[in-house]
Amino acid sequence: ISMTHIRSYLERTYRGQAACINRLCITPKELHCRLGEFGLYCPVCLALHYHLVDCSEEKALTYAAEYTGRYYKMCNKDHLERFLLTPDKFVTPGCPFTLPASDQLPVKLTTNQVKNRFPQEAEMKGFCPVTYLEGKQRYEALVRGKIEYAADYKQKIFFFETDQKRHKFMRTPETYSNQKLPVKVPPICEPVSLTSLPVLGYLEQGVSEAIIKAMTAVGCLKPKYPFFTIQKSALIYLALYLKAFNRNSAAYNREEYKKKLALFEEDCALVPYLGSTMSGDYKPPNERPIDFEFKINRFFSLKASPEASG
């Protein structure tokens, strides 16, 4: 396969035609030294639609070609075939558009790069320009972008709702960058500190989910600990459940309380077990269940334990 590519490359370049450079073992350094006037941007997208399609993220040279000693990178197979067929339409001077200067090209930004440019603020107050334009610039289309989907264009920072919206902006930034916001915009939803809330609000936002799960477990099990009231049994079970499934607690603490919770459930099961087993007439020891003696001794031992009196 490689030899076929090499032969095709040699034949086309000998005739002065554009040739694909895939499988020719061209190093990244050599590629950058011989890049054409469009750099790593697809010249076919630029000529046909005036779209800025950056091909730098694709490291392979599957859709790259050489023409007049310069290298050009295309975004897909169809554009490669178009370039190989009529390369003069897509390079200078035949290309109808030229690539903007490097400082006029959109660039993706990471979260750290955005933070390092503080106190510079995002354009459009952080609203996604692509969503706003696609929503026909209505109030409902004002959606805040995310810092992880940021881009720089002409020294301005833009945030986008999704990575796909950022990709659209990168192709035609002029389409989206000069929009004006309406006078009335949605308020900024800033996070509220839990400690700033009143007690009921703090409990609702901080522990309501955990308490609901614990109370649901209590309602399903209906625990009754030997010699304890139903209310006290439920409260102890609730406390053990919260400690056993506390995500903020250390793993070994959770495991310890899970063991205590399982033991508490076993002790609560003694009451219905003995109630059903001891109903009816007296049975001699040899007719009783094998674990009856162990469980009844366990039951009476709980009465003398400090837990039963406390």
Image: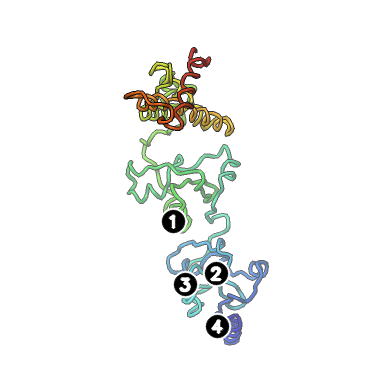
Image location of residue 208, percent across then percent down: 41, 27
Q: Hey, what amino acid is under mark 3?
A: His
> Is residue 161 or residue 38 the one in the foreground?
161
What residue is rendered at 46% in x and 59% in y? 171
| CA distance separating discs 1 and 2 | 20 Å
Q: Is residue 236 left or right of residue 115?
A: left
Give the mark, 4 or 2, whose residue is nearer the N terminus: 4
Mark 1 and mark 3 in contact? Answer it, CB < 8 Å: no
> Is residue 227 or residue 16 the one in the foreground?
227
Q: Residues within 10 Å of mark 1 (few under 14, many from 20)?
A: some
Mark 1 and mark 2 in contact? Answer it, CB < 8 Å: no
Image location of residue 251, percent across then percent down: 57, 34
> Mark 1 falls on what kind of element?
helix
Q: Hey, what amino acid is under mark 4?
A: Gln
Q: Residues within 10 Å of mark 4 (few under 14, many from 20)?
A: some
Q: Tell me the residue that label 3 is attached to.
A: 79
Mark 4 and mark 3 in contact? Answer it, CB < 8 Å: no
Image location of residue 31, percent across then percent down: 63, 69
Frontmost of labels 4 and 3 is 3
Q: Tell me the residue that label 4 is attached to.
A: 17
Give the mark, 1 or 3, whose residue is nearer the N terminus: 3
Q: Tell me the residue that label 1 is attached to.
A: 168
- Indicate whether 3 appears above or below 249: below
Residue 73: which numbered mark, if any?
2
